[in-house]
Amino acid sequence: MNNKTYKKNVVLVVDDSIDSIRMISDVLEEADMTVLVALEGSQAITITQNITPDIILLDAIMPNMDGFETCRALKEQPKLMDVPIIFMTGLSDTENVVMGLKSGGVDYITKPINASELIARMHVHLANARMTQSARMALEAAGQTLFAINKNGDTLWATPRVYQILAQAQPADTNSPAQLSNTLKTWLEHSPSAGHKMQLDNADGTVGVEYLAEIGENEFLLRLSDQPSNENYSDLLRTSFKVTVREADVLLWIANGKTNREIGQILEMSPRTVNKHLEQIFKKMGVENRTSAAAMAIRALASKG
């Protein structure tokens, strides 16, 4: 074997039982894996901030932060998105199994652990994770800034470059992940067409997102893109619906899912003034509410690519 190319799999074992950790460590080391150990969820989070394991074995029931909460916290780290997490539990009832899978786990194994079964399952998930990582790196190499979200706007997966762009573009003083999820959720609720683009409320106004397609049950494919300025979009809306420049600005942000209060802050006007503009917008567009106005604006923007 060429030692220069061989790399041991790194396994993070999270369990509050010393006896359990010793037994699992012996099994993994015998299988030629490198073992990292955490006795509680917070330790696991600290370790992964400095080291990225290839796979994580996580005890479901622990004091302070249980395995389900720990799993959700770990999966919030973009670099751990493709790292498989296998739950270890003495509980075999359906409710706990479902909780583990919903929190981000890919599999579970019941205690007492069967060593050969554990290693076999780990190899399957390690192979799947590597294929997924390779596919995303290929997309990245091809310059594809793709990502997928669910109907709540939460990111399901993304190419590495997407995370870099979003981290650089979002204002440092905002809760960026939650803010982005809310924006995308509202956008999806207006049923954007393939090719429709929306400007993100980012630091320099240069990043946009393009809707591509619904690719599965509750999974929507998007792409980050260079975005024309707000002025270009406002001009398009102004000419399409015969509204004033200021009304077009308000309509654009309505299409982006902003509330009256948020629009007022962006455009430096009071919510009451925003509402007065909306009254005129509804009249000129022949609609009765902001949902209908937003839908028409989105279709107009999509028709122009």
Image: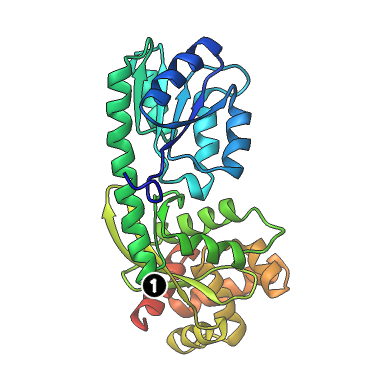
Near mark 1 (Cα within 10 A), the count class, few <14, some 14-19 or many ≥20, is: few
Residue 299, given in percent of the width and then of the height, sits at 37, 74
Q: Which residue appears at 36% of the width and 81% of the height?
A: 305
Quadrant location of the N terminus in the rendered image: top left
Q: Which residue is painted at 40% across and 25% down in the image? A: 28
Residue 197 in view in this figure: yes
216 to 204, vertically: above or below: above
| Element type where label 1 sits in the image | loop
- Say above or below: 56 vs 277: above
Residue 166, x across and y down, in percent: 55, 63
Residue at 45% across / 61% down in the picture?
187
In this rendering, the count of numbered labels is: 1
Q: Residue 11 in the image: x percent, y percent?
A: 45, 33
Q: Quadrant of residue 8?
A: top left
Task: Find residue 16 and report its image quarter.
Answer: top right
Instruction: Please state if 49 lies on the left or on the right of 298 as rendered.
Output: right
Q: Identify the colour scheme used.
A: rainbow
Q: Is residue 154 left or right of residue 97?
A: right
Residue in front for this viewpoint, 205 or 285:
205
The percent coordinates of residue 97 (x first, y second) are: 36, 22
| Residue 279 visible in the displayed image | no
- The residue carrying mark 1 is 143
Q: Amino acid at mark 1?
A: Gly
